[in-house]
Image (cartoon, rainbow, N blue to C red):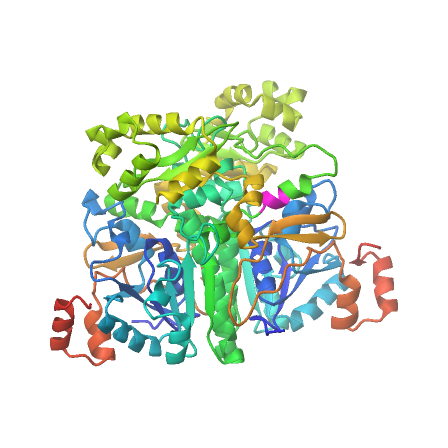
């Protein structure tokens, strides 16, 4: 088998939720040896949002390709074991609630004493060094606390509500992976590790930089536009046949507009001169959107996607999971993968997205049960005897699915 | 002047992308890489994306372009003519990474496919971003910001129930794809000495946006399937029923009160008013079902506080609360201030402006924005004359011929 990009790199994942664990998953897919350090005393909170700690879809998605050691870090012996792992590790990453890593004795200053060239990434909602560094932060709080949520609404919504999915958590996690990889490359060239302190609110703010520039340079507080664009019309999500089905359509220029009008059968209203230019369409966008909704409402969203795309107009179904599962391009790309999990059985997940010609990604394997690899890691990596392992399990310091 | 060493100092990136891929190289630039943005002589179409300085639509005044292309130098080059391609091949000799999003097969069609480029520079890492991949039923489909966000599977959960799903501001599907492309580029740079060569990276927005924005949708659905059981309920928009939004003196806040303990803490923060002490409110499902009544009751109490007051009181009592900051308030927030998140960047037309910086602080190699976005062809002289050894006269001829 070809060499993987991160062959030989040991990463310790003391993450919870998404920001760190999802970023570390990408490193695992690139070939890093990832050990998730967890315990019943200190559960990744995503394990707790399911009926049983091993059956959380979010956890099982986020922690694929990792091994789990169950070790209680609040005990001296547990700490000693973790320290042994740290001495072998290249990367240590945590996003425990602010102050928790320090209380455990696993802040950067403590860890660099045992492993001077460690790359230590810490991610906090509002950053690790501001006045709210110890504040817990879930995804919905980060879009709120960054300015992003304030413009994430239709103009006529009373106030912004964002999404019930934890945006921007999964973008923060990609930033974690980017930072760790850049730091690994720097370490490869200089031998130096370092401490990286990420703020998840800042990840969100950096994604809407132009809105900040509009304020700092034009002195204007940006208005929420909803689905409208100031340089494309139509531009929106339009209702389709069925309950809560929608199709997104965007028309940026006159060529796309002509293609659009032709594809929908040259209705009379579309011949009105006020819709002939982009400026006219923008000016009369309310009326334009009504006409288009009238056309889309009785039709199937997938049919509209195909009709418009074949005519050269960007259009796409507002997908939910079953749509993704039947999307022909997703099928063609093998973009979903079935993985067998020891407790929940065969389930579908997004497949590994990394496509590198020389260092292929590692195929997906199931997320670990809590402590699934405790014995293996203790024996092989920590060179402990079976008796020692047994004793520490009896003392409740080590944990595995059978203990 | 201080010398800033970044984590990626010493690497050179050739950025051929338009606005939909601009964030990719921007990230690498902030981490210290030298990025040269290569535009067609007429300019990147991203230069006409609003907002503009003083609402003046002008090639050098797009704040969208200026933000996503800061920290890059810029040259013009026409890859569609032979002389342009010859110049490009010279640039490749000293480059580490190329990022392009022309679309499937475009580079191959120009004779600039990976097989050609790796012969010129075996270390080159060629990153091709496409909308829908290089083959398959959607290969010729067109994407856009809103269409790609819709397809990513997260838009259906955004906004109010009963209203149209709502677009996330910015260019989320493109930026999420750019970030995953960065992950692959960095992995390729890291492993390059070990394998002795560069490589080709392929990424499609349609596939990557899902992983980049919200990969849980299919797993949650799949985990909910039981043999012979009913199909899981459809994903939809739940508005603020789970994470309620309430008005305060200076705006709005968002509350995470999922557990009874968190709810009790919230009631305590609000001064334990009798009406909120009624036992039925302790039930999360009851609160969801009666969220409009609750909102009406809450008004009286939450509006006694400012965003920061109630946020900090929530922390003391044990209920997560977050301010819904508007743009100016986040800029002036104590956290962004303490972390020096906003940086000053100079631009020849815009002048000095305050930009969001990088979302992380580093002890050894702090990210840094050393220059504003390039004017169209601003660094042609620097790159073509100083580096490739062309004369000023030759530049004039090339410009006249439409090569640069």
Q: Is residue B337 above or below residue B399?
A: above
**Quarter of the figure with the C terminus of chain B:** bottom left
Residue A325 vs B165, above or below: the answer is below
Task: Name the residue: 39% across, 48% down.
Answer: B143
Q: Position of residue A260 (x, y in %)?
A: 32, 38
Horizontal and vertical percent for residue A397?
80, 58
State how many labels appear: 0
Q: Main secondary structure of the magenta part?
A: helix
Q: Quadrant of the N terminus of chain B?
A: bottom left
Comparing A393 with A171, the one in front is A171
Residue at 29% across / 44% down in the picture? A215
Is-magenta flag for residue B202?
A: no
Q: Nearer the viewer, residue B268 or A255?
A: A255
In this rendering, does residue B12 appear at all? yes
Of residues A89 and B149, the one nearer the viewer is B149
Q: Quadrant of residue B85?
A: bottom left
Find out whether residue B217 is within the magenta segment.
yes
Q: Is residue B182 left or right of residue A321?
A: left
Q: Position of residue B391 (x, y in %)?
A: 15, 79
Where B10 sits versus B167, above or below? below
**Viewer-proximal residue, B276 or A95?**
A95
Q: Is residue A372 left or right of residue A192?
A: right
Tell me the magenta residue range.
B216-220
Can residue B167 be seen in this snapshot? Answer: no
Spot occupied by residue B222 in the image (x, y as percentages of width and height): 65, 43
């Amino acid at each position: 088998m070809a060499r993987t990009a991160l062959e030989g790199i040991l990463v310790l994942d003391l993450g919870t939720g998404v920001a760190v664990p999802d970023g570390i998953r990408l490193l695992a897919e690139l070939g890093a040896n990832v050990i998730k350090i967890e315990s019943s005393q200190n559960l990744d909170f995503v394990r707790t949002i399911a009926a049983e700690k091993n059956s959380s879809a979010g956890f099982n998605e986020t922690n694929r390709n990792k091994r789990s050691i169950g070790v209680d870090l609040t005990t001296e012996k547990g700490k000693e074991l973790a320290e042994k792992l740290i001495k072998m590790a290249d990367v240590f990453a945590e996003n425990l609630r602010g102050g928790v890593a320090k209380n455990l004795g696993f802040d950067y200053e403590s860890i660099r004493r045992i492993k001077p060239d460690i790359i230590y990434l810490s991610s906090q909602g509002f950053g690790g060094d501001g006045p709210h560094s110890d504040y817990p932060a879930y995804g919905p709080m980060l879009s709120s606390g960054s300015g992003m949520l304030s413009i994430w609404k239709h103009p006529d919504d009373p106030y912004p509500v964002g999404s019930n999915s934890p945006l921007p958590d999964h973008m923060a996690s990609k930033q974690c992976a980017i930072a760790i990889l850049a730091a690994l490359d720097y370490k490869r060239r200089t031998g130096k590790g370092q401490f990286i302190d990420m703020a998840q609110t800042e990840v969100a703010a950096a994604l809407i930089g132009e809105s900040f520039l509009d304020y700092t340079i034009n002195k204007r507080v940006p208005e929420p536009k909803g689905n409208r664009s100031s340089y494309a019309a139509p531009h929106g999500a339009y209702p389709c046949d069925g309950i809560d089905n929608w199709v997104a359509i965007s028309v940026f220029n006159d060529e796309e507009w002509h293609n659009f009008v032709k594809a929908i059968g040259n209705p009379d209203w579309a011949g009105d001169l006020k819709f002939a230019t982009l400026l006219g369409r923008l000016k009369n966008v309310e009326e334009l959107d009504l006409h288009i909704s009238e056309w889309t409402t009785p039709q199937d969203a997938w049919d509209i996607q195909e009709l418009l795309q074949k005519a050269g107009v960007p259009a796409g179904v507002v997908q939910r999971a079953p749509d993704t599962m039947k999307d022909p391009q997703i099928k063609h790309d093998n973009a979903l993968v079935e993985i067998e999990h020891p407790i929940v059985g065969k389930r579908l997940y997004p497949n590994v997205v990394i496509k590198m010609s020389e260092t292929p990604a590692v195929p997906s394997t199931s997320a670990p049960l809590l402590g699934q690899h405790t014995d293996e890691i203790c024996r092989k990596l920590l060179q402990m005897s079976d008796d020692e392992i047994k004793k520490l399990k009896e003392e409740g310091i080590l944990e595995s699915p059978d203990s | 002047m201080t010398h800033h060493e970044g984590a990626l100092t010493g690497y050179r990136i050739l950025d051929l992308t338009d606005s939909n891929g601009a964030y990719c190289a921007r990230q690498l630039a902030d981490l210290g890489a030298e990025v040269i943005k290569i535009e067609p002589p007429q300019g990147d179409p991203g230069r006409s994306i609003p907002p503009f300085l003083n609402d003046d639509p002008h090639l050098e005044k797009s704040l969208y372009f200026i933000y996503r292309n800061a920290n890059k130098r810029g040259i013009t080059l026409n890859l569609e003519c032979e002389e342009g391609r010859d110049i490009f091949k010279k640039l490749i000799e000293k480059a580490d990474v190329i990022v392009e999003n022309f679309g499937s097969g475009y580079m191959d069609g120009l004779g600039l496919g990976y097989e050609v480029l790796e012969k010129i520079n075996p270390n080159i890492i060629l990153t091709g971003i496409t909308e829908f991949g290089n083959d398959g039923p959607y290969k010729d489909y067109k994407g856009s910001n809103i269409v790609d966000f819709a397809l990513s599977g997260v838009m259906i959960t955004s906004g109010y129930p009963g209203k149209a799903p709502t677009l996330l501001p910015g260019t989320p599907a493109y930026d999420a794809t750019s970030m995953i492309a960065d992950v692959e580029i960095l992995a390729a740079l890291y492993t390059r000495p070990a394998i002795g060569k560069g490589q080709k990276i392929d990424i499609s927005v349609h596939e990557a946006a899902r992983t980049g924005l919200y990969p849980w949708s299919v797993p949650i659905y799949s985990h909910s399937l039981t043999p012979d059981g009913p199909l899981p309920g459809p994903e939809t928009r739940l508005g603020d029923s789970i994470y309620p939004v309430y008005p305060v003196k200076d705006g709005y806040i968002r509350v995470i009160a999922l557990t009874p303990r968190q709810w009790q803490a919230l009631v305590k923060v609000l001064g334990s008013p009798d009406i909120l002490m009624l036992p039925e409110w302790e039930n999360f499902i009851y609160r969801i079902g009666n969220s409009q009544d609750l909102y009406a009751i809450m008004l009286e109490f939450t509006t006694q506080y400012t965003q920061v007051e109630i946020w900090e009181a929530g922390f003391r009592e044990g209920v997560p609360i977050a301010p819904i900051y508007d743009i100016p308030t986040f800029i002036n927030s104590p956290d962004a201030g303490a972390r020096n998140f906003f940086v000053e960047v100079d631009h020849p037309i815009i002048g000095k402006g305050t930009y969001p910086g990088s979302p992380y602080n580093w002890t050894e190699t702090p990210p840094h924005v050393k220059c504003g976005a390039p004017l169209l062809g601003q660094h042609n002289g620097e790159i073509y004359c100083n580096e490739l050894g062309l004369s000023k006269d030759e530049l004039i001829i090339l410009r006249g011929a439409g090569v640069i």
